[in-house]
Image: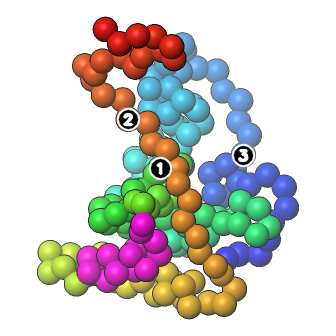
């Protein structure tokens, strides 16, 4: 974990510059279809254009790190490309190239560590991905064994929009 920083966290997990720009309405609407915040949409488009290998991250950005929420609490934040499909773990995007992990009920850090080890041993995984998974495993193991951290699992609620589903009843309404 990096040294404690004061003030508002960096919006893009790296230094940024305020830029005022005038764009046509249709361009702003198109950017909002990519992301509700046009700045995030522009960053996402830029990262897509400048990345030659979609697995690569900006230099110096780890595949997994702790994002400090308060002086005592952090979330595990990952590169969603590094952890795509791990049983019992949902990858929840929060920023361009960053996501936090949500565990299924009854799952925790040890389950993540086992899943990463098993994925690393998959013969279909290429050498670069295997190396990245090894680094990820080492970091998770270090955190798990450290006396400086205590892990707990909290629930989050996912709302899934289902096409063609019946509308939910209003409170107090009778079923039809």
Residue 1 place in picture, x, y as percent: 67, 77
Q: What element carries label 2?
A: loop
Q: Mark 2 points at which residue?
A: 160
As drawn, is 164 to the left or to the right of 31?
A: left
| Picture quadrant where residue 19 is located | top right
**Cα distance between the residues tagged 2 and 1:** 15 Å
Residue most toward the right?
Answer: 6
| Picture quadrant where residue 65 is located | bottom right
As drawn, is 114 to the left or to the right of 159?
A: left
139 drawn magenta: no
Question: How dense is the environment of label 3, judged by Cα within 10 Å: few (below 14), some, or many (20 and up)?
Answer: few
Which residue is at 38% across, 67% downward? 82
Cβ atoms under marks 2 and 1 closer than 8 Å: no
Mark nearest the camera among 3 and 1 is 1
Foreground: 84 or 146? 146
Q: Is mark 1 on a helix, strand or loop?
A: strand
Question: How dense is the environment of label 2, judged by Cα within 10 Å: few (below 14), some, or many (20 and up)?
Answer: few
Foreground: 153 or 176? 176
Residue 26 visible within the image: no
Question: How dense is the environment of label 1, judged by Cα within 10 Å: few (below 14), some, or many (20 and up)?
Answer: some
Residue 25 visible within the image: yes
Q: Name the residue under label 3.
A: 17
**Cα distance between the residues tagged 3 and 1:** 23 Å
Tell me where the magenta segment starts and ends, as one range.
106-120
As drawn, is 149 to the left or to the right of 3?
A: left
Residue 44 place in picture, x, y as percent: 47, 44
Q: What element carries label 3?
A: loop
Mark nearest the camera among 2 and 1 is 2
Q: Residue 93 carries which label?
A: 1
């Amino acid at each position: 974990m990096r040294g404690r920083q004061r003030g508002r966290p960096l919006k893009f997990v790296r230094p940024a510059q305020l830029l005022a720009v005038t764009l046509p309405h249709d361009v702003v609407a198109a950017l909002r279809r990519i992301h509700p915040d046009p700045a995030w949409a522009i960053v996402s488009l830029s990262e897509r254009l400048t990345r030659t290998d979609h697995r690569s991250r900006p230099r110096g950005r780890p595949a997994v790190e702790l994002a400090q929420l308060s002086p005592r609490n952090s979330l595990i934040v990952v590169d969603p490309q590094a952890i795509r499909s791990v049983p019992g773990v949902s990858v929840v995007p929060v920023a361009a190239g960053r996501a936090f992990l949500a565990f299924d009920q009854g799952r925790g850090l040890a389950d993540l560590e086992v899943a990463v080890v098993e994925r690393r041993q998959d013969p279909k995984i290429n050498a670069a991905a295997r190396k990245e998974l090894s680094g990820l495993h080492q970091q998770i193991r270090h955190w798990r064994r450290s006396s400086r951290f205590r892990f707990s699992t909290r629930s989050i609620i996912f709302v899934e929009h289902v096409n063609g589903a019946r509308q939910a009843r209003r409170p107090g309404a009778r079923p039809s």
